[in-house]
Image (cartoon, grey):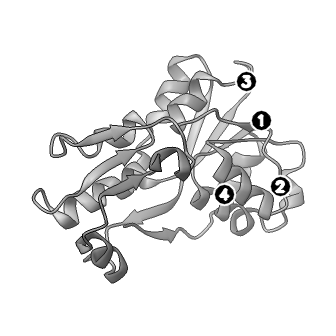
Amino acid sequence: MTEIDFLPPKKSWIQEIQKSDWIILTSGAAARTLPQIMGDLRTLHGKRIAVVGKSTAAILGALGLRADFVGPGPGSMALARAWPGKKSESILHLTGNAEEGGLVKVMRRMGYPTQRIEVYRNRLPPCLPKPVLSALRQAGADWVVFASGTAAQRLRRLVGKTAMPRIKTVEIETAANLRPRRPALAIFKSFECKGSLK
């Protein structure tokens, strides 16, 4: 649903990371940018890393890094509500253009000094990939499940109102990207597919 373009790393990003106590990653794409930004991941020694959920923690683990805090889910607002850090600690959110700074605003309102760097961009493909289109046309494709608000927005734009199937989302923020067009909407609290398919 979304094509991701990683932005060329800037030297200033390394400086921002080095002066931050915490790094927040709210997507797998953000986690995957760390090797390109830092080069040697050992330079992150002493930094604490917070991730939005288990899947982002797994991607971080595949890079040889461990998350110091895994948000309870679903979504970045749950991470903010459960934030374990101190108000004296500086925070840097590595994210994409679709996020638009919502997490930073919430963290600042809560009294945490938080900055944001856009390290990748989400791009709307010109049309749906053939496997997605084919699955939507199958009689057995009753539901589409979204864990990403960006992907939900993209499907809505590409498919239009009449062809939209029933939707399930993992969080209220993702659901908001589909309204008011989708009355048959369910929101569930588990990131696990098995939780959404019962």
For disc 1, the neighbor class at 10 Å (few under 14, some 14 to 19, many from 20) is some
Check disc 4 and report the residue beneath it: 31
Q: Position of residue 127 (x, y in %)?
A: 25, 77
Q: 6 and 180: which one is in front?
A: 180
Name the residue beneath numbered marker 2.
65
Q: What whole-number distance in Å separates the C-alpha atoms at marks 3 and 4?
A: 20 Å
Seen at 15% across and 46% down, the residue is: 181
Sequence-wise first label, 1 or 2: 1
Looking at the picture, how far across and down is residue 39, in whole percent?
79, 68
Marks 4 and 2 in Cβ contact (< 8 Å): no
Q: Residue at x 85, y 61 (%)?
A: 64
What amino acid does circle 3 point to? Pro
* Cα–Cα gap, marks 4 and 2: 10 Å
- Classify 10 Å Cα crowding around label 2: few (below 14), some (14-19), many (20 and above): some
Q: Label 3: state its secondary structure.
A: loop
Q: Which mark is residue 86?
A: none
Alpha carbon distance from label 1 to label 2: 16 Å
Question: Which residue in the rendered view is the most extreme toward the bottom?
Answer: 130
Q: Could you tell me how far apart the alpha carbons at marks 1 and 4 are, in whole angstroms?
A: 17 Å
Q: CA distance from mark 1 to mark 3?
A: 12 Å
Please report the residue visible at 29 percent of the width from the left and 54 percent of the height from the top.
153
**Which amino acid type is marked by label 2?**
Leu
Question: Which residue is nearer to you in this view: 37 or 3?
Answer: 3
